[in-house]
Image (spheres, rainbow, N blue to C red):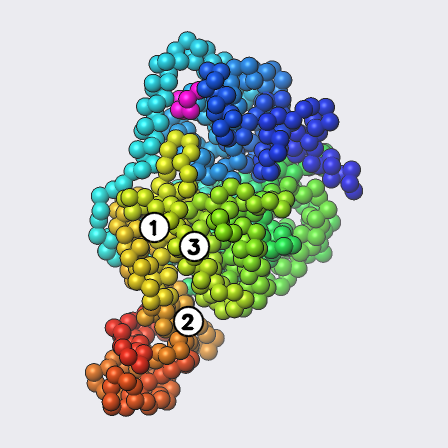
Amino acid sequence: MLKSVLLTLALIFPALSQAQEAKPNHLLGQSSPYLQQHLYNPVDWYPWGAEALEKAKREGKPIFLSIGYSTCHWCHVMEEESFTNPEIAAYLNENFVSIKVDREERPDLDEQYMLVTQALTGSGGWPNSVFLTSGGDPFYAGTYFPPDDFLDVLQKVNGEWKANSTALSADAAGLSAYIRDYMNRSAAARDVTPEAIRTAAQSVLPDMDEFNGGLGVAPKFPQESLFLFLLDQAERDGDPAMLAAVTNILDGMVKGGVYDHVGGGFHRYATDPEWRIPHFEKMLYNQAMIGRLLTRGWETTQEPAYRWAAERTFDYVLREMQAPAGGFYAAQDADSLDKGGDLVEGAFYIWTPEEIRAASAQADMLIETFNVVENGPFEGANILYRSDLPEGDFESLNKGLEDLRLTREHRPRPFTDQKIVTGWNGAMIQTLAEAGAVFQRPDYSLAARKAAQFLVANLLDDTGLKRSYINGTAGIDAHLADYAALGMAALALQDYGDTSADWLALAQHMATEIPARFGTADGRYRMAEKTDGIGVYKPLDDSELPAGNALTLELFAALSRRTDNPAYAQQAQLLQAAIAGAALEQPVARAFTLKAAQDFTLGATGTLRYLSGGAVRISAEQDRKNGRMVLNIQLKDGWHINAHKPLDDFFVPTDVAINGQPAPADIYPEPKVKQLGFNPAPLALYEGALQLTVPLETGETALTVQACSDTVCLSPETVVFRVW
């Protein structure tokens, strides 16, 4: 067994097999799994830092910067073909200073140099290959290069550098200035009205793939931030076209091969329009964000397949991606060993009819359901996909899939990057806390709590938050999105009843740290505390998670609804003014900013709402079987809402309207009659917790309340719950 494990590791990571016969390069001591994979390359890699940058200046050599991550298929290919090639390594070592960066540890550098590659080539990807002057300015870039092409590029770049370094450096300095301007770009301030955001959302719909779901053709990415925004907008407007855009992508992904039907969880993207052929790596952030979209999609539509796919995804995360101590691992590789011992993308996930027949007594059903054929279209085998959403007999389907999963466990497994990334964990915690309540799965809630406790214990101290943790060590200062995502994770735990810690206090601490560490004069927040690379970067575009500024706006907006501290609303207002105009200009890339702006100005959508500075908490439960909706209202100690008949016409009554018509009078409980300090006359009111059970009807159910304490009454507020 041990021999098999070592063989697998050596094949996946050639550096391990070279360790006994080669000396380590300057990556020695780095904890990043990606950098460790290149430790014994003959290329004399340096980590990003002063030593490498000063060496380039001192020796007058250009820099070759290679950025990737540990589970990246094409990163592995380029390492095997080029970075272990003695001729290429010797040429790099003689003429360049070579630097390796893990994009998952240093997204600030990754995003800067991806902008360079996109500006120079019109596209991007990983590995990202960028050439810099000895002074650190970029002048040439690409992604994956085959070995012959790569050696040719190296020779041409080196020749140009030696012949024209002065002119090349001047051009590169100009490119750096352009990128700096872009990273600090702003847009004219605009009124962020519901109408303006509605128009931005509708502008996206013509580009949707109505047949297969999703945006564009291929390759196809989930773009969860965009579809969470569209779902939010559908809820606000009752727009069936907006909802259809969301259900179409969920249907396409749940049916397609991008979803791992056997083990649960989603691959990173599809290489075809139909979602059938995935790029096989599995990233934690996709499970968190697609899982959240599925959970909210199920709440909205009650489509059973969404719950089925969501729960199988979360079960996979708890089974394979959660460390024993609580944190969630970063990713699983696309590549694994096939039957012949070769490293192949997708080998772990593909099936032949014979393999399915050997694995399950339900083979005939599985073969038909998942379109399995002899001599399948993917390397002679099959990627499982469905023609229709699953319905009906989930128990039988799950049993057959479990047979396949247990059989698959005997295959060589893909490498798991056990790095724990704070922002990605924050997103997963937020999703699991919500899913635990929605699906009544206490195991999800417990997993979310355990992960949050791990982050607090291991990545947060008096010096601040760290971004990543591996092998017992936390390193790299956290970025803006890490602070904001942990803040939202803490609020989710608080929202859904976890009392193991003061999670609201943690969220407030994150919100206090953000301006102190990342604030700038123009109201936007910088991605990292320290300026590194080309310059200061103020992130506006959504990536694997929503943009850091969008997440921060969401955090400030959420705190403004849950507390009576006016500072959060002020901070949200200033940030919204600074970034929402740019989001209206490019709603696809900056969709989450628009969702966060709506949360701030109008309140959140969904089944859980806060009113009156957190004095009133309302959750809605749809009981479709019995045709009713239950509105659960929880009031803070010292607060009440007026009864349906408050005994004084001056006070606004608690009132429910269904599609504009009054709800039946018998839904309201008996009030308490009390005399309060600000009013000598007795008042009828509700305190503590109460339930209002109303008929479940398609359309809008609106609840109006006015919250009062013993000394003050706040303005009345209305929340609307939509039934599709």
Badge 1: few (under 14), some or many (20 or more) residues near its Cα, within 10 Å? many
Q: Is residue 80 left or right of residue 154?
A: right
The local secondary structure at tag 3 comes to: helix
Tell me whether circle 3 and circle 2 mark residues in contact (CB < 8 Å).
no
Between discs 3 and 1, the one toward the N terminus: 3
Q: Amino acid at mark 2?
A: Ser
Badge 2: few (under 14), some or many (20 or more) residues near its Cα, within 10 Å? some
Q: Which residue is mark 1?
A: 593
Between discs 3 and 2, the one toward the N terminus: 3
Q: Which residue is mark 3?
A: 510
Secondary structure mostly taken by the magenta-highlighted segment of the chain:
loop
Residue 403 visible to the viewer = yes
Residue 212 visible to the viewer = no
Q: Which residues are magenta?
A: 134-139
Mark 3 or 1, which is nearer the eye? 3
Separation (CA) of disc 3 from disc 1: 19 Å
Badge 3: few (under 14), some or many (20 or more) residues near its Cα, within 10 Å? many
In the image shown, does 485 or 414 lie closer to the viewer? 485
Q: Amino acid at mark 3?
A: Met
Q: Is residue 255 left or right of residue 300?
A: right
The local secondary structure at tag 2 comes to: strand
Q: Amino acid at mark 1?
A: Thr
Q: Is residue 137 magenta?
A: yes
